[in-house]
């Protein structure tokens, strides 16, 4: 084993200190049974874990951390595990997105405040991955992401079912009488049958793939199921590798370049990834000073076909994706077609091109070839502009209904998701299949936290009539496991006086995705008159984190981060108070 001792390491400001300070730092660590020799200048590696039984997708990460520790010890480092908060979308109210920025702040400050030379980031549910990346990027110490892996495929009545995606389907079946409450209750256990995050191409799987595409996760590691032994092998390999990264001083600022972000945007299109990647990538880019604006998510993907046939856009699930070759196979296809940059360096120390050299694709159903794709080029995320969304809105074309991508219909406006749900089952609700359902006050400031409420279920009377999709417009988000013709992230949001606040029942809404426009067919003078009459909602919060959030959160087109967290703050060793 290579001698890793170096008295100039960051951690030696603690463990190599003389006198009382050094005695304090070392002796209190030794109450855990560490011998004196582990403080000899070897790399100290933090293992940040969001393991929590309140975040079911992350509950198994304690076991993953043990595998990371093995790798760190093997490579001659000192592993020290520490907990972070867990932002689990499945339980947290009002939404886990409200706490992404808080988690990013916590991760950043914990890394900076402690005697660490590098860090391994263990995440699972969809907000934990970007939060950890954002925090680590702001500190800029060597870091490797290890996501916890997807659940095994759901199985119900002889067919595969996908977490999240089938929740919406089963809800529709329940409303139309195709399923009973008892059958839905039984299906719950069939849908989530192992540790891990959603096994559809929802936001958790998307962000795992995006972390790999950015170069922050080891090649192939995004797709191994949580309970597959190779998930633990991957974690152990990450522990070994981060020790070498400390020696090489390979930090996020060298990996998270403009070209790396362009790769991630294109990969997200190719995998049929979540619209939430737009929010998270934009926020992460802001942490490292990379210019990435909303229009990049449209411009960069127009030539990229959807290659991956996974729910909610397709048929298969992450377990199938893994066995078909995983993300390296997708990236190899894109590289072969000149659609990715091959030069960016990754956590392996090698380039994207070197990492994907020799990657194989097995079969042609799950990961399709570039020349016969699952969906043609231009079916990725579309960025819309117009008088309803002057700062932009997004729509996931691969999960939308083609016949609704060009649509004109009267607005039916609801001032909150709850207001809609209160009447959605009313047989006399004044809507038809041409109606555009508008949900407002669900943005970053308005809800607060920008929840995943935009893909509201269709009115019960239309479901029973056989209607399967409608245009919905909202300043909130949609779960990556969701589907439908849903316009999301409308900016500026209604709560800050965006045009969505001025829409009234019956106003003609015109959606033209090919032209990338979303507009209200109402005279400009009338809209201006309504704007002058509008009064902002009263502040609901006078203190605490939620007050801080509503005062400082940026709009969706800027990633919904806090303005004061943009840019990095480095890893300078804090002053010694001892």
Image (spheres, rainbow, N blue to C red):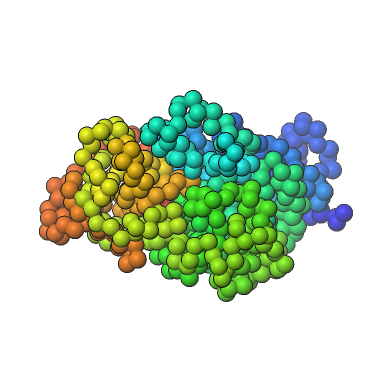
Please provide percent x and percent y for residue 269.
50, 61
Closer to us: 501 or 117: 501
Looking at the image, residue 106 sits to the left or right of residue 231; the answer is left
Closer to us: 566 or 297: 297
Quadrant in which the N terminus is drawn: bottom right
Closer to us: 463 or 417: 463
Quadrant in which the C terminus is drawn: top right
The residue that appears at 84% across and 38% down in the rendered structure is 35
Extreme residue toward the top, this view: 182
Please provide percent x and percent y for residue 543.
37, 34
Extreme residue toward the bottom, this view: 338
Q: Give the vertical position of 129 relative to 194 (above or below).
A: below
Looking at the image, residue 329 sits to the left or right of residue 79; the answer is left
The residue that appears at 46% across and 51% down in the rendered structure is 276
Q: Is residue 366 visible?
A: yes
Q: Give the vertical position of 239 relative to 348 (above or below).
A: above
The residue that appears at 81% across and 36% down in the rendered structure is 34
Please provide percent x and percent y for residue 178.
43, 34
The residue that appears at 69% across and 40% down in the rendered structure is 227
Looking at the image, residue 502 sits to the left or right of residue 235; the answer is left
Q: Quadrant of residue 263?
A: bottom right
């Amino acid at each position: 084993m290579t001698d890793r001792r170096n008295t100039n390491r960051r951690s030696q400001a603690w463990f190599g200190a003389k006198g009382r300070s050094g005695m304090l730092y070392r002796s209190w660590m030794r109450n855990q049974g560490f011998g004196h020799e582990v403080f000899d200048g070897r790399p100290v590696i933090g293992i940040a874990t969001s393991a929590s039984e309140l975040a079911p997708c992350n509950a198994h990460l304690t076991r993953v951390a043990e595998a990371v520790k093995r790798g760190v010890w093997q490579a001659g480092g000192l592993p020290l595990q520490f907990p972070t908060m867990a932002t689990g979308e499945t339980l947290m109210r009002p939404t886990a997105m409200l706490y992404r920025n808080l988690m990013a702040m916590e991760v950043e400050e914990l890394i900076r405040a402690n005697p660490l030379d590098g860090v391994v980031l263990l995440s699972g549910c969809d907000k934990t991955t970007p939060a950890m990346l954002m925090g680590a990027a702001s500190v800029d110490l060597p870091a490797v992401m290890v996501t916890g892996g997807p659940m095994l495929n759901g199985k119900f009545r002889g067919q595969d079912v996908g977490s999240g995606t089938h929740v919406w389907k089963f809800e529709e079946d329940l409303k139309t009488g195709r399923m009973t409450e008892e059958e839905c209750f039984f299906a719950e256990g069939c849908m989530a049958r192992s540790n891990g995050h959603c096994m559809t191409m929802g936001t958790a799987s998307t962000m795992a793939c995006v972390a790999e595409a950015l170069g922050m996760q080891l090649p192939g590691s995004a797709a191994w199921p949580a309970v597959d032994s190779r998930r633990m092998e991957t974690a152990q390999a990450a522990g070994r590798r981060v020790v070498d990264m400390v020696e090489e001083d390979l930090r996020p600022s060298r990996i998270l370049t403009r070209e790396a972000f362009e790769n991630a945007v294109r990969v997200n299109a190719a995998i049929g990834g979540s619209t939430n990647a737009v929010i998270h990538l934009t926020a992460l880019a802001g942490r490292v000073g990379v210019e990435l604006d909303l229009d990049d998510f449209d411009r960069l993907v127009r030539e990229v076909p959807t290659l991956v046939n996974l729910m909610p856009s397709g048929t298969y699930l992450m377990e199938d994706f893994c066995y078909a070759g995983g993300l390296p196979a997708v990236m190899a296809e894109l590289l072969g077609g000149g659609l990715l940059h091959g030069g960016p360096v990754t956590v392996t120390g090698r380039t994207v091109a070197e990492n994907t050299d020799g990657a194989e694709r097995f079969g042609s159903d799950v990961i399709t070839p570039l020349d016969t794709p699952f969906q043609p080029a231009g079916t990725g995320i579309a960025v819309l502009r117009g008088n309803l969304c002057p700062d932009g809105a997004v729509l996931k074309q691969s999960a939308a209904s083609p016949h609704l991508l060009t649509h004109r219909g009267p607005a039916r406006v609801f001032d909150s998701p709850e207001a809609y749900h209160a009447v959605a089952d009313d047989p006399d609700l004044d809507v038809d299949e041409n109606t555009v359902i508008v949900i407002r006050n669900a943005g970053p400031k308005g809800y607060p936290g920008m929840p995943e409420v935009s893909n509201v279920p269709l009115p019960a009377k239309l479901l029973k009539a056989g209607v399967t999709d409608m245009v919905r417009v909202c300043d909130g988000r949609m779960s990556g496991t969701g589907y439908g013709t849903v316009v999301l992230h409308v900016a500026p949001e209604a709560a800050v006086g965006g045009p969505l606040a001025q829409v009234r029942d019956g106003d003609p809404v015109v959606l033209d995705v090919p032209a990338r426009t979303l507009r209200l067919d109402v005279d400009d003078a009338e809209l201006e008159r309504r704007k002058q009459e509008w009064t902002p909602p009263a502040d609901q919060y006078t203190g605490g984190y939620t007050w801080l959030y509503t005062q400082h959160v940026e709009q969706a087109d800027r990633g919904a981060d806090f303005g004061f967290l943009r840019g990095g703050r480095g890893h300078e060793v804090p002053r010694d108070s001892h």
